[in-house]
Image (cartoon, grey):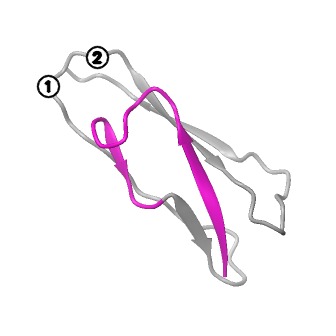
Amino acid sequence: AITVPLNITGTASNGADYTISNANLVFAAGSTSTSVDVIILDNTSDQADRTVILTLGTATPYGTNGATNVHTITIQDED
């Protein structure tokens, strides 16, 4: 297995706008994919859309494979 750090940025606030299951992704031996749960939290505030940007870090000493390693989630205001 290999563990890859997940860097989380964006305009949304962890704990107020969303929660995330884990900041480290664990890939089982021979696996090419894994998952992370991002739970969107409901609030009563009137806010602009917010983003959660997930960027795969580098698993030392393995490096990256050059694939796209950034994913953006937009949380739209529902109020």
Please indicate whether residue 78 sits to the left or right of residue 44 in the image. Answer: right
How far apart marks 1 and 2 lie (CA) works out to 9 Å
Question: Dot 2: within a 10 Å radius of its alpha carbon, few (fewer than 14), some, or many (20 or more) residues?
Answer: few
Residue under the point 71% across and 47% down: 69
Query: What is the x, y in percent for residue 66?
Result: 85, 51
The residues colored magenta run: 1-22
| Residue 54 horizontal/vertical position (percent) | 57, 44
Q: Amino acid at mark 2?
A: Gln
Marks 1,2: beta carbons within 8 A: no
**Amino acid under label 1?**
Thr
User: In which quadrant of the rendered image does the C terminus lie?
Assistant: top left
Q: Secondary structure at mark 2?
A: loop
Residue position for label 1: 44
- 51 sits to left or right of 59: left
Q: Which of 44/16 is in front?
A: 16
Considering the numbered disc 1 on the image, is that residue within a helix, a strand or a loop? loop
In the rendered image, the vertical position of residue 38 relative to residue 62, given as above or below? above
What is the number of the mark on residue 47?
2
The answer to which quarter of the image holds residue 64 is: bottom right
Relative to 18, 2 lies left or right: right
Q: Residue furthest front?
A: 60
Q: Position of residue 20 (x, y in %)?
A: 40, 53
